[in-house]
Amino acid sequence: MTTSPPTGLRILLVEDEAVIAMTAEDMIEELGCVVSGQAATVKEALDHVQRDNFDLALLDINLNGIMSTPVAHALRAAGKQFIFTTGYGISGSDISFADVPVVTKPYTLFSLSAAISDMAGTA
């Protein structure tokens, strides 16, 4: 049985599709968490990582045709937990991220809650 993520958990949302980002934001807020920042490009995401105003990141693997691997490396270097999201699968992804959870799109409130709860240690 999956529990809900901790209330107030600050989440960085890295997603290039506006409709998916809006849906994810609604789901995150429904779970009692807060979207503390949004990014649609690798550069924007890296800027947010430097600001360090989040607890956990949801990171789309493919941002407008560009792999988000540099963001994943920056998150790991900063000691931040993150969850990959994808609608394409993770084939060809950097093997050093094999331990990172993946939520496939379209994700549901349940799948998002389970992944965030697991990363936050509340499952």
Image (cartoon, rainbow, N blue to C red):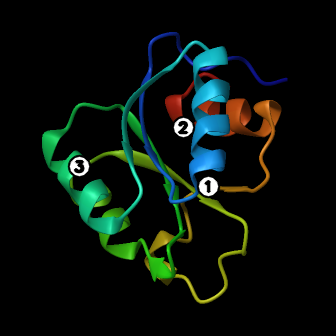
Question: Which of the two discs, 1 and 3, labels the residue nearer the N terminus?
Answer: 3
Circle 3 residue: 49
Q: Compute the Cα span from label 3 to label 2.
A: 18 Å
The kind of residue tagged 1 is Pro
Give the number of the mark in front: 3 or 2.
3
Q: Compute the Cα span from label 1 to label 3.
A: 19 Å
> Residue 72: which quarter of the image?
bottom left
> Residue 80: which quarter of the image?
top left
- Extreme left residue here? 50
Q: Is residue 13 above or below residue 104?
A: above
Question: Which of the two discs, 3 and 2, labels the residue nearer the N terminus?
Answer: 3
Position of 50 compared to 7: left or right? Answer: left
Q: Observer-nearest residue: 77 or 107? A: 107
Q: Identify the element where label 3 is drawn.
A: helix
Circle 2 residue: 119
Question: Which of the two discs, 1 and 2, labels the residue nearer the N terminus?
Answer: 1
Q: Observer-nearest residue: 40 or 33? A: 40
Q: In x, y percent, where is residue 58?
A: 51, 47
Q: In x, y percent, where is residue 73?
A: 30, 68
The kind of residue tagged 2 is Met
Position of 72 compared to 120: left or right? Answer: left
The kind of residue tagged 3 is Val
Q: Is residue 57 above or below residue 46?
A: above
Q: Compute the Cα span from label 1 to label 2.
A: 8 Å
Instruction: Give me the disc on residue 101.
Output: 1
Q: Residue at x 81, y 39 (%)?
A: 108
Q: Residue at x 55, y 63 (%)?
A: 99
Q: Identify the element where label 2 is drawn.
A: helix
Q: In x, y percent, where is residue 109?
A: 77, 31
Q: Is residue 104 above or below residue 18?
A: below
In which quadrant is the N terminus drawn? top right
